[in-house]
Structure formats: C-alpha cells, structure tokens
Amino acid sequence: MKKKANTKNGICLASIKTEKEISAIQAEISKSACIEQNIRYLNAVKDGTRFKIVYLLLRFEHLCVCDLANILDVSSPAISQHLRKLKDMDLVSMTRQKQTLFYSVKDREFANFFKAFNYETKK
C-alpha cells in the first residue's frame, strides 16, 4: 500500500514500509554476518588486477608471480603487492616448490562467492 512518508532523506510517495518495518530491516542488515562477509569479498576484488588474479587462480588452481605477471602484463612487484593484500585477508595461500612460490585461493567460501558471479571459473 503506497503512502506518503516523511524520511530523513525527504518525502517518499511510494513507500510501502512503515517506520517500524524500516527500523527492523535496518537492524537486520546491521547484524548480518553474511552481508559483512560479502562486503569483505567485494573489497578484496574491487581492484581490476586483483579480480583477474583471483579469476586466474581459480581457473588454473595455482600460479606463480611470474606467470601472473606475464599473463596480465603487469610487473612482478605489482602482482606481489596484490597477492600480499589477498594473503593478508586470508583469501589466498602460498606453497613453495624449491625457490618458486605458488599461490592459490585458500578460502572456499570466497571461491564459491566469486564463482557465483563469474561462470567461466566454474568447473
């Protein structure tokens, strides 16, 4: 039911929610761990290069810095910085094989979240 509602953002002529319902919804989203986790994941890939890195790590399971740098045509130090941010967020892990570090997506929930928006990485 449409009604005229005065809000802190002005007058809304299309509101179908009461002030009580709006307060309840605001409380619900402020407490939602799922929403906070999704925001964390989106922040992790908001940079285009990091998005591509995650895409590649999911597609090829593990890659080294030099492979990522060559594929993305970005310097190795830049790739290392992006990987460090993802590692600091506990989303990727690294394994050493002799003197080479290989990176992979560590967090399965993050992988599933990413795949939900990017069908090409689904297997």
Image (tube, rainbow, N blue to C red):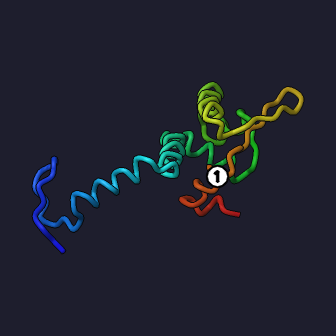
Extreme residue toward the right, this view:
98
Where residue 49 appears, as percent x and y from the top left, is 55, 39
Where residue 111 appears, as percent x and y from the top left, is 64, 52
Tell me the SS state at disc 1. Answer: helix
What type is the residue that disc 1 sits on? Answer: Glu
Where residue 10 appears, as percent x and y from the top left, is 11, 51
Question: Which residue lies under the disc numbered 1?
Answer: 109
Image quadrant in which you'd find residue 99: top right
Q: Quadrant of the C terminus?
A: bottom right
- Residue at left offset 63%, top offset 56%: 112
48 above or below 20? above
Nearest the eye: 73 or 65: 65
- Left or right: residue 24 versus residue 79 is left
Image quadrant in which you'd find residue 63: top right
- Left or right: residue 20 versus residue 64 is left
Image quadrant in which you'd find residue 75: top right
